[in-house]
Image (spheres, rainbow, N blue to C red):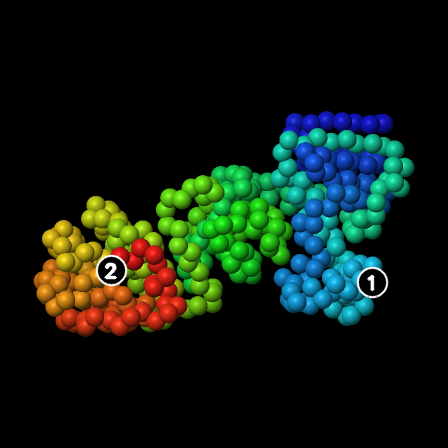
Amino acid sequence: MGVIKGDLDLLGIAQLLQTLSTSECRGILTISRAEEKKILDFGPKGIRLVGGVRRTNPLGEILVRTGRITPEELDALLVEQRAAGRRLGELVVERGIVDRDSLDYALREQVAEEIYDLFTWTGSVFVFDTDRRGIEGLKAMPLADVTLDLNVVSLMLEAARRVDELRQIQAVIPDQRLVAQQLELPARLDDPSLDRSAVEEVLPLVDGVRTIGEVIESSFYPQFTVLRTLYGLSRQGVIKIRDQGDQRGPMTIIHRPLNSAGGAGSGKDWTALVVSSLDTFRAALAFCMRSARCRAVEARDLEEVRAVLSRQPVDVLVVDTPLDTDDGLAMARAIRAETRTPMILLSNNGTKKAIVNALQTGAEYVLVKPFKEDVLMRRIEQVLSGETFGEEPAAPAVEQGSFLDQISDAG
């Protein structure tokens, strides 16, 4: 057969691997993209990755995320590995961290991930050389001794599934130079396809500064897992994908551990309509509801309130509007005219006159800013239980570290 060259975008990596496998070709396949390349050896026993490892799923990272070792233990092992000139796999088997079968499985997983990575490449070319003698001149790679079955059907099925999913992901994340920032984090995620462990690993890396590529590089998870996790979080409204220069929209970074069940109201089945013209503050209020495992929908103004009420029932309204202005009071009255749903007003004016005027709009309760999130949740529960209240005295200064105190445009 000699040497075959071609444009991989035209032939496709799936077609190329399937052709070489079913034809029982023997040789060296080199796939190149710009400065990157991967080299696969198609030998009599199977496929080996002998060059160009991108380390998309390093062994140490597999051990950390599967709970076999801690990040600190990995750092210590890597120091010892470099000093002794030994492979990490040898050390972890010797220490009894994993047995030989588990190590072999992890190494095969690494090779498979490296091959799956090829399915994300564009603008690449390939060279297949049936002369395998050149393999002797290649520098020994950490995974070069790992052999995958020459029958690539299982690889093809998983790769095809990933390709379909990547098309959806790329509609949201078309470029890894984009930046991910957090918006809100519900205590539970409704997307069953998301790996909770991956979410807990990836989400803290989303800081509004790192690019998608940098998040991938910083994570213990392989590229595809990170991308599908970011995609799922974006669909849930937990993060926003934006250009580095795009400063529009809420920029406050909101993060809470996933195991937080919230405060009062936890486990209740109710829906709040959160109304505020302040984007970040409104997102923060909605976050409080979802942290208590309740539903929340948002509206910026009266028109959006009407649109929400026309399509779904809500149990309580939480309305942030200037209660010391005629426009703010008019907004509250207009909402009350639309619905008899219990309403809590948020006021930045704690004077008796402002509170009395607010209560005259028909609201069940007025809460003066600043306030603690658990106070808000407790007042919502009291309103939903049928209790009614008069004025709320001005709240003391918000304790340092309180969630709502970190919102820059809380008004």
Give the percent coordinates (x, y) of residue 329: 13, 55
Observer-nearest of 326 and 21: 326
Return the residue nearer the eye: 247 or 346.
247
* Residue in front for this viewpoint, 229 or 268: 229
Asked if residue 141 is positioned above or below residue 163 in the image, the reply reads below
Relative placement, left or right, of 342 versus 296 is left
Q: Residue at x 16, y 58 (%)?
A: 323
Q: Is residue 133 left or right of residue 397?
A: right
| Residue 120, picture quadrant | top right
Label annotation for residue 384: none
Position of the C terminus, as image quadrant, is bottom left
Cα separation between marks 1 and 2:
63 Å
Closest to the camera, between mark 1 and mark 2, is 1
Crowding around mark 1 (Cα neighbors within 10 Å: few <14, some 14 to 19, many 20+) is: few
**Residue type (three-letter) at the residue carrying disc 2:** Val
Mark nearer the N terminus (1 vs 2): 1
- Give the answer, above or below, for where 176 lies relative to 276: above
Give the numbered dot on residue 318: 2
- Give above or below for 127 relative to 342: above
Q: Which residue is mark 1?
A: 84
Q: Position of residue 372 (x, y in %)?
A: 31, 69
Whether residue 142 appears in this view of the structure is yes
Q: Position of residue 279 (x, y in %)?
A: 31, 51
Residue at 47% x, 65% y is: 257
Q: Quadrant of residue 44?
A: top right
SS for callout 2: strand
Residue 378 in the image, given as x and y percentages of width and height: 28, 71
